[in-house]
Amino acid sequence: MAKDAIYHEEAQRLFVIEGYSLDAIVVMLKEEVSRKTLFNWKTKYKWDEKRKNYLNSTKSLQEDLLEIAKTAIKEAKVNPTPHNIYAVTKAIGALKLLQGAGLPDGQDEAEEKDKKPKSISQETISFIEKEILGIK
């Protein structure tokens, strides 16, 4: 019963929300819980049904956000105010966040940070001095 109190919620979250297999969860919990125990919890607490419901609710949310984004885009086309354009960017951002936006394990995000320059180049400084500040 002690295992149930300590590890059940985390194991259920990993299975239902994160989508990990029982074998992966055993490793993640550092083998503190056996696969047999996880299987028993999965059966007893109906994790498969909970996972299915979670995935359906997420899919529904994605569909709703997609509809909101489409509506915001249509509105911005008709009336391109800053407010409407901002609504489009927020709706698309939320949709990308929900869909994962092609960022598995944060790898793409880390690569993007590596591509950004660490400082301002001399060319940029020269451009600012000449074009913006008027210094020759």
Image (cartoon, grey):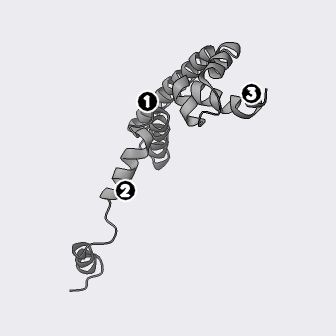
User: Percent x, y for residue 57?
Assistant: 58, 21
The residue positioned 46% from the left and 41% from the top of the image is 93
Label 1 CA crowd tier, 10 Å (few <14, some 14–19, many 20+): some
**Residue 8, located in which quarter of the rendered image?**
top right
> In the orientation shown, which residue stands out farthest toward the bottom?
136
What is the secondary structure assignment of the residue under circle 2? helix
Estimate the spatial distance between the alpha carbons at disc 1 and disc 3, rounded to whole Å. Answer: 45 Å
The residue positioned 47% from the left and 46% from the top of the image is 86
Q: Which residue is mark 1?
A: 70
Residue kind at label 3, given as amino acid type: Asp
> In the orientation shown, which residue stands out farthest toward the right?
1
Q: Quadrant of the C terminus?
A: bottom left
User: Percent x, y for residue 123?
Assistant: 21, 74
Label 3 CA crowd tier, 10 Å (few <14, some 14–19, many 20+): few
Q: Which mark is residue 17?
A: none
Residue 63 visible: yes
The residue positioned 59% from the left and 30% from the top of the image is 14
Q: Which mark is residue 113?
A: 2
- Residue nearer the viewer, 112 or 86: 112
Please tell me whether mark 1 or mark 3 is closer to you in this view.
Answer: 3
- Residue nearer the viewer, 89 or 8: 8
**Residue 117, located in which quarter of the rendered image?**
bottom left
Q: Which residue is mark 3?
A: 4
Decide which of tag 1 and tag 2 comes sooner along the chain. 1
Estimate the spatial distance between the alpha carbons at disc 2 and disc 3, rounded to whole Å. Answer: 41 Å
Q: Quadrant of the N terminus?
A: top right
Please tell me whether mark 2 or mark 3 is closer to you in this view.
Answer: 3
